Image (tube, rainbow, N blue to C red):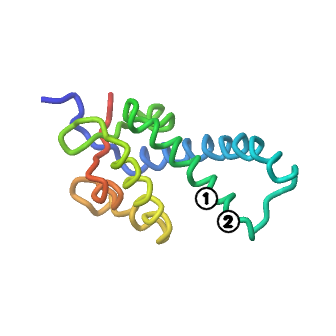
Amino acid sequence: MHDFVARPGFIRCLAAVIYDLFLVVALWFVATALILPFNAGQAFNSRQLFYPVYLLIVSFLFHGWFWTHGGQTLGQKAWKIKVLTFDYKPINWLQALLRFSAAIVSWSVFGLGFLWMLVDKDKQTWHDYLSKTKLFVTE
């Protein structure tokens, strides 16, 4: 038997996402400051594809590192949520990449992939299914 039995509800998951969003935006500021000297100190413009790709990579590294090192981002830790495999093991970098990529898809269709947990019997999102991961309450 595992300590992780309960699944977090929609509001708890949304709160963790919002918490992490604030952290990622702060991280984007730092990441931008680090590369501004390479753009002659000028703001990045819409024709520079490198910049949004760079921020996407920074975002993935944030999420991926926390998910593969303890199973919780800071927002998930604050809201007592842990991401594990279906058999309660830590996720690997490939699963983190699949989860992150699928979450982008989940949110890009008006959040339907995230809202899916409201109708799913196991309270899973599209990115849970696609990455073969589950969220658990850690209380």
> Disc 1, disc 2: CB below 8 Å?
yes
Q: Secondary structure at mark 1?
A: helix
Identify residue for label 2.
Answer: 49
Position of 15 relative to 137 (above/below): below
As drawn, is 38 to the left or to the right of 76?
A: right
x and y percent of residue 133 in the render? Answer: 28, 48
**Amino acid type at mark 1:** Val
Q: Secondary structure at mark 2?
A: loop
Q: What is the quadrant of residue 85 in the picture?
A: top left
As drawn, is 20 to the left or to the right of 125?
A: right
Position of 66 relative to 17 (above/below): above
Nearer to the camera, 83 or 43: 43
Q: Could you tell me which quadrant the N terminus lies in?
A: top left
Nearer to the camera, 75 or 24: 24
As drawn, is 70 to the left or to the right of 54?
A: left
**Amino acid type at mark 2:** Leu
Disc 1 crowd rating (10 Å Cα; few below 14, some 14-19, many 20+) is: few
- Residue drawn 73% across the image and 65% down it: 48
x and y percent of residue 116 in the render? Answer: 34, 63
- Residue drawn 22% across the image and 37% down it: 88
Disc 2 crowd rating (10 Å Cα; few below 14, some 14-19, many 20+) is: few
- Residue 53, numbered label: 1
Q: CA distance from mark 1 to mark 2?
A: 7 Å
- Residue drawn 36% across the image and 57% down it: 127
Position of 78 relative to 102 (above/below): above
- Residue drawn 61% across the image and 44% down it: 24
Position of 108 relative to 42 (above/below): below
As drawn, is 59 to the left or to the right of 113?
A: right
